[in-house]
Each structure stands twice: as C-alpha cells, then as structure tokens.
Amino acid sequence: MSALLEVSDLKRYFLKNKAVDGLSFSVKKGICFGLLGPNGAGKTTTIEMLEGIVKPTSGQILYQGKPLDKHIYHQLGIQFQHTALQDHLTVLETLKMFSAFYEHTIKIDDLISLCHLEDFVYQDHQKLSGGQKQRLLLALALINDPQLVFLDEPTTGLDPHSRRLFWDLVNQIKSQGKTIMLTTHYMDEAEYLCDEIAIMDKGKIIALDTPVSLLQQHFSGALIKLPKQNIDQHSFKDDILKLFNIQYVQQSAQIQSDDIQLSLVELINQKVSLEGLQVKSANLDDLFLKLTGHGLEGVKNV
Ligand SMILES: Nc1ncnc2c1ncn2[C@@H]1O[C@H](COP(=O)(O)OP(=O)(O)OP(=O)(O)O)[C@@H](O)[C@H]1O
C-alpha cells in the first residue's frame, strides 16, 4: 500500500511552547490513522498543519509525494471540532450552500443517505442533537468527495449510542476507499476504528504502530487489578509493592502477569486481600499509562 501522506520532522512552536516537536510518520491510502493523546498533546496543531491551516515552524508534509498546495487542499475533507454554520438554515439548505463552494461534489441525496440525515433534513441545524450535528458536519466534510478526511475529536461529548452510530459511519466511509485521519482521546474509539495509531504526549510521538502490535510489544499475559486499599492496608505494603511490581492507577493497584494462576496463588500466600479483584487484557489506556506514567483521564483534567 502506498503512502498518501508523509510527514517528516514536523515542528510547531508557539514561543517557548513546543506544541509539536519533531513528528515523523506516514499514512497509507485507505486506512484510518489515529492521532491519540490527552488535551494539549499537540493533536489539533498537528492536523491543522496537515490541513494547511497552521504553518509549521519546520519540517515537511508530502501528499501523494508532493508538498501541500492550494490545489491539494480542495481534495481534503475536514470535520472541525466546532464549525460556525450560517444561522436559520435547514440541514438541506446548509448542504446546498457548502456544495456551491466546490466544482466537484457528491450528490446531496447520496450524502443524506450515507450520513443518515433523512429524518431531520428540513430541520434548522441549530436544533439538532449532538449526534445529529456531528453527522451533518461529517456530511459537509465529505461534500467534495475527498480522498483524505480529517476528523478532529468527532465524538467528544456524544452519548454511547450516538458514538456507536458515528463509528459505523466512519467504517462505511473507509470501506469506500477513503483515508481517514482521526484525532481522539478515547482509546476505545481508537481500538475500534484505527488501523494504525500514533500516541502523542507533550508534542512528541511516543508510540506508533497498529493497536494490536503495540499491545503485543508492551504487554504479555493479563492485568490483575485490585482496589488500592487492599495493598495500602497490608502490614508489609512496601515489600508487596516490590514483590509484585505493582503500579497504582487512580484507585486501583495493577499487576502485569504472564501466569495469572501463579500470581493469584502468590497473592493469597502473601495474605493480600483479593476482594474486588479483576483480571483483564491490557488496552490502549493501559499502554498510555505504561508509556507516560500518567493516565489519560488524569492528564485531561489538569
Ligand atoms: N494558537 C496558539 N497559540 C499559542 N499556543 C497554542 C496555540 N494553539 C495551540 N497552542 C498550544 O499548543 C499545545 C498543543 O495544543 P493542541 O490544541 O494542539 O493539543 P490537542 O492535543 O489537540 O489538545 P485537545 O485535545 O485539547 O484539542 C497546547 O499547549 C496549546 O496551549
């Protein structure tokens, strides 16, 4: 598969703030590539450089082997986190207005059906629910039949049902051969949608691969989770922490184990309470914590 987008040593500094600090990656045609990380990691600045909205401090971006120019921007589709739409227009009128901006467009009826807008096509766009609004914004991003579609945190604030609907829609668009560049701080979203991911933290990429490969590289076996207090209340807490190489994550104590049965027997032998015990496979949240030493949620609220 050929690379649609190639990025080398891309930087964007805002005075002393190294918002994006030397990113290199390529995005193959037809995949969903995810840029993940907590608030402030540099995701939006990165995609705004790829979209031509923000000028890089340095570095190179090639689209189909050529530097970005005005001609190429017409081939991109962008779903912004917030788009100011003209007031008092229905969904249909909004689609028609955006359609007039481009020479080559998808038929409006096809867009309505693809993005499931039928039920509210004559409704004022300001009266749409969060999920409906996101589907309209996606339709607007697809109006020029782009090869590469940027989705910047498209499901932030949506309820679980609307998120699922949106995910199905993204997969449908991908099955049409379009390439998708997604930013998110939801690791479950990335695991569900992305073929490849780059995890960003403080302006740098700290991991880059398929989700499955990344999890295989960093975890074997499974994670045993116990309430933190089970360890804190143990008379030999420090010995137990060292013996099992325990990592605290918010209110839980986590042990990575290649042999669950053996680890559980050892915990019982050491008289650690197993009340509230959970055994699970590692996911991208666990990976992020392992790589950075801090959880996504914790960072998000700083
Ligand atoms: N126009 C700007 N001027 C100054 N600093 C900026 C500007 N845009 C972004 N930054 C800073 O760059 C850093 C990265 O911000 P960015 O919005 O790219 O992160 P993000 O990962 O997209 O976060 P979020 O998930 O909140 O959108 C932050 O420290 C932010 O304050």
Image (cartoon, helix red, strand yellow):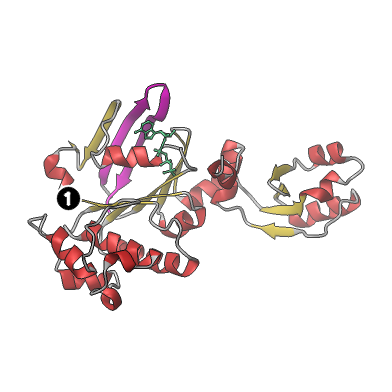
Mark 1 secondary-structure assignment: loop
Q: Residue 23, how many percent across, how many down? A: 37, 33
Q: Residue 297, how many percent across, how many down? A: 57, 47
Query: Which residue, given by chain and number where applicable, does mark 1 sit on?
Result: 75
Residue furthest left in the image: 103
Q: Assign the C terminus to one quadrant of the image.
A: top right
Residue drawn at 30 percent across, 25 percent down = 57
Extent of the magenta region: 3-29
Answer with left or right where residue 40 lies relative to residue 216. Answer: left
Q: Is residue 12 magenta?
A: yes
Q: Within 10 angstroms of label 1, few (less than 14), some, or many (20 or more) residues?
A: some
State which quadrant residue 145 falls in.
bottom left
State which quadrant residue 10 falls in.
top left
Residue drawn at 17 percent across, 50 percent down = 75
Assign ligand 1 to one image quadrant: top left
Residue 61 in view (yes/no): yes
Residue drawn at 77 percent across, 48 percent down = 228
Residue drawn at 35 percent across, 51 percent down = 81
Closer to the camera in the image, 211 or 59: 59
Closer to the camera in the image, 18 or 92: 92
Answer with left or right where residue 275 lies relative to residue 217. Answer: right
Q: Residue 170, how many percent across, how many down? A: 34, 62
Answer with left or right where residue 233 lies relative to residue 63. Answer: right
